[in-house]
Amino acid sequence: MTSDSSSRAIRFDPFLSRLLNRMPESMVESFSDAQLEALRSAMVNPARHKLDIRLSIPTPFKRFYLVFLAGPERRSKERRLSDGFRLWTPANTIFLTLLLTSLIVTLYNGFYLASSLTPEVSADESHPTALPWVKSEQGCTGKYRQWEDGFCFDSEHSPDF
C-alpha cells in the first residue's frame, strides 16, 4: 500500500498539480511514478541564469511581464537551429524600436543638458594668451601680439585652445 500512497502523493504534488491540471485526464493517468518524479525534478530545479530580471508591468487594462535572461549558452547547435531565429517578430520589432528610440532620446537630452551647462563664449571676445617661448619685445611681432609687463600676449587664440 505504500507504493499506492506514494503514487497518490506524487500526483497531488504542488509542483506537478498545475501541469497535470492542464492535461487531459487520460494523459495524466498514463504517466508512471518515475515519469512524474522526473517531471517534478525538472520543474523544481530550473536552469539558473547569470542575469535574471523579471518585471511585472501594470497598465490600466492588463498586466504585462518582462523577462530578461542572460548567461552561458548551454543548448546544442542542433537545438539552437531547431528553435529558429525569432528576433524580428512584430512584437519584438516594436519593442526594439521603442528601446532604441528611448536610448536616442536619453542620449540627446544628456548631451543637450551637458552643452547647456557649459558657458558660451562669443567668437568676437578677445582672450589674450601669454606666449612663454617669446622672451623679448623684438620677438613679439605680429598682428594680434603685444608686449606687456615683460610678456608677449597673443589675442588671436580661442579659449577652447
Image: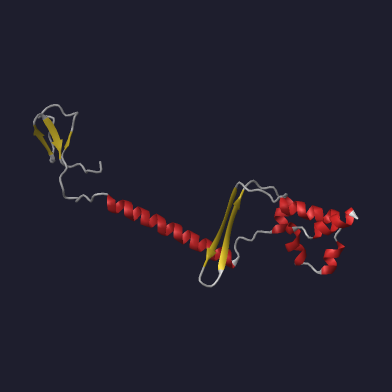
Depth order, front residue of 131/101: 101
What residue sits 85% from the left and 68% below the top? Answer: 26
The residue most toward the bottom is 61
Which image quadrant: the N terminus?
bottom right
What residue sits 64% from the left and 61% below the top? Answer: 86
Here the colouring is: secondary structure
The percent coordinates of residue 60 (x first, y second) are 50, 71
The answer to which quarter of the image holds residue 80 is bottom right
Which image quadrant: the C terminus?
top left
Above/below status of 81 relative to 148: below
The answer to which quarter of the image holds residue 133 is top left
Depth order, front residue of 46/155: 46
The percent coordinates of residue 35 (x first, y second) are 83, 55
Q: Is residue 113 left or right of residue 54?
A: left
Above/below status of 35 relative to 127: below
The percent coordinates of residue 79 (x first, y second) are 73, 54
The residue most toward the top is 135
Depth order, front residue of 78/138: 78
The residue most toward the right is 1
What residue sits 68% from the left and 59% below the top? Answer: 84
Above/below status of 123 relative to 96: above
Q: Is residue 131 left or right of residue 114?
A: left
The residue most toward the front is 1
Q: Is residue 119 left or right of residue 139?
A: right
